[in-house]
Amino acid sequence: MKLKQLLTAIEYRAEQVPDVDITDLVYDSRKAVPGCAFVCLRGANADGHKYAKMAAEKGAAVIIAEEIVEAPVPVILTDNTRLALAYLSAEFFGHPAEQMHVIGITGTKGKTTTAFMMRSILEAAGHKTGVIGTIGVLYG
């Protein structure tokens, strides 16, 4: 996907936006590959901004950050990279959430039982289902 198309998903600041194809989105510099966009995330144990240069050296085509970082590739600035990663991912992967229906179950007791009953009912009606809960992730 072209970088300019990808960036339509977020508000950003940049001196220039190169006409490059983005091959992947990564936020772990160890997983950076040629052509990817590296998104700098701040976490409890690490700050991705410190690894921007490393990601660029591994082939990242662009860095998406909250602050100016030293890197030999263009840097795109945005106010919240964690939020930006969500929007960029949706754009990059073709908005998969628009293709599914989600049912949330809340409360104090009976959530797992209710989820599995809903799964059974929906599958009996011919729908594909997935369940994410305290006892695991089931899909397909």
Image (cartoon, rainbow, N blue to C red):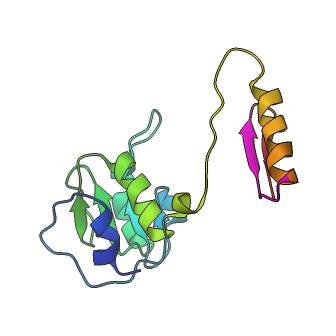
The extreme left residue here reads: 15
- Image location of residue 130, percent across then percent down: 75, 50
- Quarter of the image with the N terminus in it: bottom left
Q: In the rendered view, does 81 fall on the left or right side of 79?
A: right
Residue at 32%, 63% (x, y): give it: 9
Residue at 49%, 64% (x, y): give it: 95
Residue 39 in the magenta stretch? The answer is: no
- Image location of residue 119, percent across then percent down: 81, 44
Compared to 34, does 41 lie above or below?
Answer: above
- Image location of residue 49, percent across then percent down: 33, 51
Residue at 54%, 57% (x, y): give it: 97
Region of the chain picked out in magenta, as a range: 125-133
Q: Residue 47, located in which quarter of the rendered image?
A: top left
Q: In the rendered view, does 23 fall on the left or right side of 102?
A: left
Compared to 57, does 38 lie above or below?
Answer: above
Compared to 94, does 127 lie above or below?
Answer: above
Q: Residue 58, located in which quarter of the rendered image?
A: bottom left
Residue 131 in the magenta stretch? The answer is: yes
- Image location of residue 12, percent across then percent down: 20, 59
Residue at 45%, 32% (x, y): give it: 44
- Quarter of the image with the C terminus in it: bottom right
